Image (cartoon, rainbow, N blue to C red):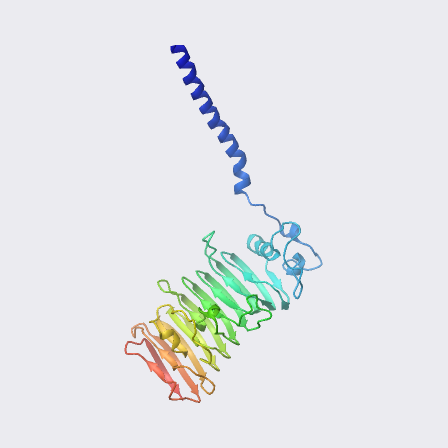
Amino acid sequence: MKNHIFLIIFSIVFFSCNSKEQLKKKSKKIEPTLLTKKTYTENQLSLHKKYKIGDVRRYGIFPDSANLYRHPLTNNPKITDVLDIAENEGVELFFPKGHYNLPLILDSRENIKINSDSAEFDIIHITINPKTKKQPKNIEIKGTIISFDQLGISGANNVKIDTIIIKSDIVKSALKMRARGCHIYYGSKYISIKYLEIYDFGSGDKRYSNNHAALTIDGMGNQPKNVLIDKVYIKSTDRHGVYITGENHFIGNIVIDKFGVGSSNYMLPMQDADLIEEKLFSAVWINKCYNSIINNIYINNIDSKGFFTANFDEGDLKKPVIIQNLEVENFNRTLPIRFVKNTGVKVGLIIK
């Protein structure tokens, strides 16, 4: 009887150990296929080698073409493959002039250089990919780039853009919406734009609920820092022109031709602002912003509506926002310049 018990125990232990060994072997075989991502070189991904290295036409991406999407070798979106080349091999990408029926998604990308000859895209997005949770950083866009939706930047570090133009075109927009402006959001720092132009900023149905200002710099709890913009030109905005929070910003010139001409319907509350304030449209709204400089602001009130020409909200005069010159053309007393009691804004010269 004892011998039988011994054999049973021995068998259980033996097969248990053997099963573990087999599982280890299987896991060793499976592991590489799960963890290893197939990568391709620039040369392998080249489809039209008459174009120079970095020219996106070399990899099958042509403006004003329907044949943009999948690469025949990788079956990935071609735009993903070219961005991989830029990131992995240090290749500067060139997008020739024309309309690319694509979004330009640079989420969690690093060390990307793009040269754009007035290339047109849908949304231009530079934020943290929720899967990798990696911060996008060291991204440079030279030349002029155009969006028919929005420039959205969040959690990014060291982004440089020469010229970005945002226009409304519901035919070219993937969402069939008017433009959603430029939003520099939560955790972003060292964002540099030489020239930002916003032709139109929409309002209307629920799709525009987060459309607050043509240029918004905010992020409650982790406001943007060190945003540098040489010139902002806003041709028309349905809601606010500029909303700025954060610290250590520099803006050379702000020009706003028309503001507050749309609807506040379906608007959601804004970061760091009191309820209802989002609906009190102003050309320039500065709130909880510190140690920043704006050289010149020009606002034209002739066709504008809203509540304030400028709303200089909460701040700290020990860490002020300094505006050298504020010029208002066609000043209207129904659109006053508001200084709250605890404002942090100092204005050198006001011309009405």
Tag count in the figure?
Answer: 0
Q: In this view, does 102 lie above or below 241?
A: above
Tell which of 180 and 109 is nearer to you.
180
Tell which of 247 and 217 is nearer to you.
217
Position of residue 19 in the picture relative to residue 220 (left or right):
right
Position of residue 169 in the picture relative to residue 133 (left or right):
right
The answer to whether residue 247 is visible is: no
Position of residue 281 in the picture relative to residue 194 (left or right):
left
Q: In which quarter of the image is the C terminus?
A: bottom left
Tell which of 251 and 129 is nearer to you.
129
Tell which of 294 and 172 is nearer to you.
172
Residue drawn at 64 percent across, 53 percent down: 71
Q: In this view, does 68 lie above or below 294?
A: above
> Residue 109: horizontal and vertical position, in percent?
51, 56
Residue drawn at 62 percent across, 56 percent down: 78
> Residue 198: horizontal and vertical position, in percent?
51, 75
The answer to whether residue 61 is visible is: yes
Which residue appears farthest toward the left when viewing the image?
341
In terms of image quadrants, where is residue 240? bottom left
> Residue 20: horizontal and vertical position, in percent?
46, 28
> Residue 254: horizontal and vertical position, in percent?
46, 78
Q: In which quarter of the image is the N terminus?
A: top left
Which residue appears farthest toward the right when viewing the image?
50
